[in-house]
Image (cartoon, rainbow, N blue to C red):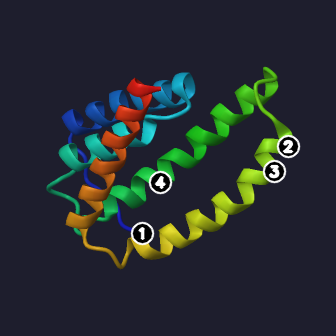
Amino acid sequence: MRGWHLGAGDAYKLIFAGIAAGFANGLLGAGGGIITVFVLSRVMKKQITHKNDVFANALCVMLPLSLISCTIYALKGHMSVDGFGVFAIPAVVGGAIGGLLLGRLKAAFMRRLFAALVIISGVLLIVR
């Protein structure tokens, strides 16, 4: 693990983006990762030594965001325990496979894949 050296301006940008990512994730249940990837790739572009660092850091940010959002949704009764159980184990397996592949895939491919996922998700949200 390595550290990033932040200037005051970059730190404020990351703080604001973190609030926006948390807000999107908590309100919509999604979108925090999109904001995180976008901001990290722009703000930290000079300090990123490997292009996949952006995706790895975004995943690490999303874990606590998702846990907090999930806890709040569950406390308010907006979560199906049956659905969670059936979906969670395969999702963890998929997450482990994706995490292992992340270091082996080229950053350009990852950007295109991420962009395609965002576009497809947006189109499906509009159509449905």
Q: Is residue 110 above or below residue 23?
A: below
Residue shown at 28% from the left, 46% from the top:
40
Identify the residue position indicated by label 2 in the image. Answer: 82
Q: Tell me the SS state at disc 2.
A: helix
Identify the residue position indicated by label 1 in the image. Answer: 1
Residue 49, by quadrant, is bottom left
Q: Position of residue 91 (x, y in %)?
A: 64, 58
Amino acid type, label 1:
Met
CA gap between label 3 and label 4 equals: 21 Å
Q: Position of residue 41 (x, y in %)?
A: 23, 49
Amino acid type, label 3:
Gly
Q: Quadrant of the N terminus?
A: bottom left
Task: Name which of mark 3 and mark 4 comes first in the sequence.
Answer: 4
CA gap between label 3 and label 2 equals: 5 Å
Tell me whether the residue at label 3 lies in contact with that at label 1, contact meaning CB atoms closer than 8 angstroms: no
Identify the residue position indicated by label 4 in the image. Answer: 59
Point out the residue furthest to the bottom here.
Answer: 104
